[in-house]
Image: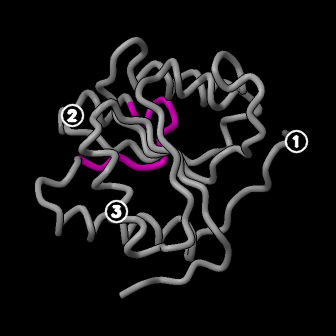
Amino acid sequence: MTLQPTKPVHILLADDDEDDRFLTREAFQHHFPVSKMQFVEDGEELMEYLRRTGRYENAAHELPELILLDLNMPRKDGREALQEIKMDRQLRHIPIVVLSTSDAQDDIENSYFWGANSFITKPTSYQKLMDVTKAIGSYWFETVKMAAKEDE
């Protein structure tokens, strides 16, 4: 079943695994065809994207409505990026769903401590990924009321 969000949604997926990026995009597009999903491959690129620095210095993109964050990435991992985002006044309002292969209790507890809004262990099958993406999208884009964005 395709869901119809009230407006196009902008999701940023930070994940170094190309297959995971592809499958996650396909699953979201199945449920939310108007969603816009963009990708970064590590925490450094994530922060450049959000702060419009480095390769994104002249980019005219808006901040995402939701970040899906893998913890285990090169250069700067998701743990470090999560802390930076939640300590930044202009970024901390963006909901972050940790979507990681980890199911370590330390990773779960630390993610919530640093401000993650949800922690989900990556599903092991495409059907389960479809279920997870439907639940994420339904919750974040149809159920909850979001805080107003800070001035960009």
Report x, y in % for residue 6: 66, 79
Comparing 103 with 123, the one in front is: 123
The image quadrant of residue 142 is bottom right
Q: Nearer the viewer, mark 1 or mark 2?
A: 1
Q: Which residue is mark 2?
A: 105
Question: Which segment is the magenta one?
Answer: 111-121
* Above or below: residue 30 compared with residue 76: below
Q: Which residue is mark 1?
A: 151
Report x, y in % for residue 67: 51, 45
- In the rendered image, the quadrant that contains the N terminus is bottom left
Report x, y in % for residue 28: 40, 65
- What is the residue that sits farthest to the bottom in this orientation? 1
The image quadrant of residue 93 is top right
Q: Evaluate if marks 3 and 1 touch, with contact meaning CB atoms under 8 Å apart.
A: no
Q: Callout 1: few (<14), some (14-19), or many (20+) C-alpha neighbours within 10 Å?
A: few
Give the total of numbered labels: 3
Residue for point 55% across, 75% down: 143
Q: Evaluate if marks 1 and 2 touch, with contact meaning CB atoms under 8 Å apart.
A: no
Q: Is residue 87 left or right of residue 3?
A: right
Q: Circle 3 — which element?
A: helix
Residue for point 66% across, 68% down: 145
Q: Nearer the viewer, mark 3 or mark 2?
A: 3
Disc 3 marks which amino acid? Answer: Glu
Residue for point 69% across, 44% down: 63
Q: Which residue is mark 3?
A: 26
Q: Callout 2: few (<14), some (14-19), or many (20+) C-alpha neighbours within 10 Å?
A: few
